[in-house]
Image (spheres, grey):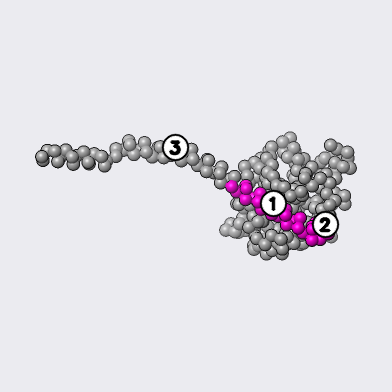
């Protein structure tokens, strides 16, 4: 009987023990499973963030349309000035410069706040940028409004020139092709980040275009855009990543770096009101 009891105790002790090799196998298995699961979880998170971003844009676009409906078709845009050494909006859908705004007051003082009423709608969850000089403070506004939608430049502000009047939309019913004219877009962190999104040109007819603002790449290689007809979509860029040299320099424009970058620039320019005006005036397809 003593012998049997001793054997049982030895067996029980053996069942409770792990060898070093067995422990290493378990750890390696967990590591393999984690390596397989984490990319899927990361993709799911990115997709969810993009969905929230599109929902934000949908609601901003709806607010933009409500404003026009309440103002006999006159649309909200941006009145922009170069003050205190940087670009900012002094009147429009949102005010200030989100690269420098220390609070959300410039969102609340914008003309769309009456229709939105929620600061979260102005921030893309994939946007990790911070307010200039405040590494602890996320910027409040991740979006810009297409720069030829009722754009006004304060007299005396340095500029390369305003678009011709037919290329600057004032009333919603004067839009040439609402389904192909974008309104709001999520933008690259380095943008000057007054609330207007601009693309520059030196020869409109010949298509000599430059980046002045750059679109977002928060969702992989995609940016999300809303359009004047109310729909929202993501667009995948052919060339990324894009970077800034000196985004605070108001006179600096960036030519496309290569053919793919130029294709991205032209795709976006063609979906501005000015781009559609150019097509009509030049007889382009």
Separation of residues labelled 3 and 2 (CA atoms): 59 Å
Closer to the camera in the image, 164 or 34: 34
Q: Which residues fall within the magenta stretch?
A: 48-75
Task: Please state the horizontal and vertical placement of residue 98, each as a whole percent of the image.
Answer: 68, 57
Residue 73 is tagged as 2
Q: Main secondary structure of the magenta part?
A: helix
Quarter of the image for residue 268 reads top right
**Residue 32 makes an appearance in the image:** yes
Q: Dot 1: few (<14), some (14–19), or many (≥20) neighbours within 10 Å?
A: many
Q: Which of marks 1 and 2 is nearer the N terminus?
A: 1
**Total marks drawn?**
3
Residue 5: give x, y in percent of width and height.
14, 41
Q: Which mark is residue 32?
A: 3
Q: Is mark 1 on a helix, strand or loop?
A: helix
Residue at left offset 65%, top offset 56%: 121
Q: How far apart are marks 1 and 2 (CA)?
A: 19 Å
- Quarter of the image with the C terminus is top right
Residue 78 placement, left or right of 54:
right
Labels 3 and 2: the sequence-earlier one: 3
Which residue is drawn at the image coordinates 80% and 52% (left, top)? Answer: 149
Secondary structure of the residue carrying numbered label 3: helix
User: Pointers 3 and 2 in contact (CB under 8 A)?
Assistant: no
Between residue 259 and residue 63, name the one nearer to us.
63
Which of label 1 and label 3 is nearer to you?
1
Residue located 81% across and 45% down the image: 177
Label 2, secondary structure: give it: loop
Residue 194 location (% of width, % of height): 72, 56
Give me the disc on residue 58: 1
Q: Where is residue 51 in the image (x, y as percent from the top left)?
A: 62, 48
Q: Give the mark nearer the N terminus: 1 vs 3.
A: 3
Residue at image coords 65%, 60%: 118
């Amino acid at each position: 009987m003593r012998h049997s009891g001793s054997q049982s105790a030895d067996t029980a002790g053996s069942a409770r023990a792990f060898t070093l090799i067995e422990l290493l196998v378990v750890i390696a298995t967990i590591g393999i499973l984690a390596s397989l699961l984490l990319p899927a979880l990361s993709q799911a998170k990115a997709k969810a963030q993009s969905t929230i971003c599109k929902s934000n844009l949908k609601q901003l676009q709806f607010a933009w349309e409500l404003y026009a409906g309440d103002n006999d078709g006159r649309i909200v845009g941006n009145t922009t000035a170069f003050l205190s050494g940087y670009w900012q909006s002094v009147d429009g859908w949102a005010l200030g410069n989100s690269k420098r705004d220390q609070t959300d007051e410039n969102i609340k003082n914008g003309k769309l706040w009456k229709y939105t009423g929620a600061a979260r709608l102005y921030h893309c969850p994939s946007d990790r940028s911070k307010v200039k000089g405040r590494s602890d403070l996320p910027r409040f506004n991740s979006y810009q409004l297409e720069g030829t939608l009722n754009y006004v430049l304060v007299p005396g502000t340095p500029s390369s020139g305003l678009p011709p009047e037919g290329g600057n939309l004032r009333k919603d019913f004067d839009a040439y092709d609402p389904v192909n004219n974008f309104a709001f877009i999520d933008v690259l962190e380095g943008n000057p980040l007054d609330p207007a999104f601009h693309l520059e040109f030196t020869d409109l007819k010949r298509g000599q275009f430059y980046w002045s603002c750059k679109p977002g790449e928060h969702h992989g290689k995609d940016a999300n855009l809303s359009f004047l007809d109310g729909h929202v979509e993501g667009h995948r860029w052919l060339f990324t990543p894009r970077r800034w040299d000196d985004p605070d320099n108001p006179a600096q424009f960036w030519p496309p770096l290569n053919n793919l970058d130029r294709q991205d620039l032209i795709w976006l320019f063609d979906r501005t009101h000015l781009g559609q005006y150019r097509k009509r005036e030049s007889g382009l397809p």
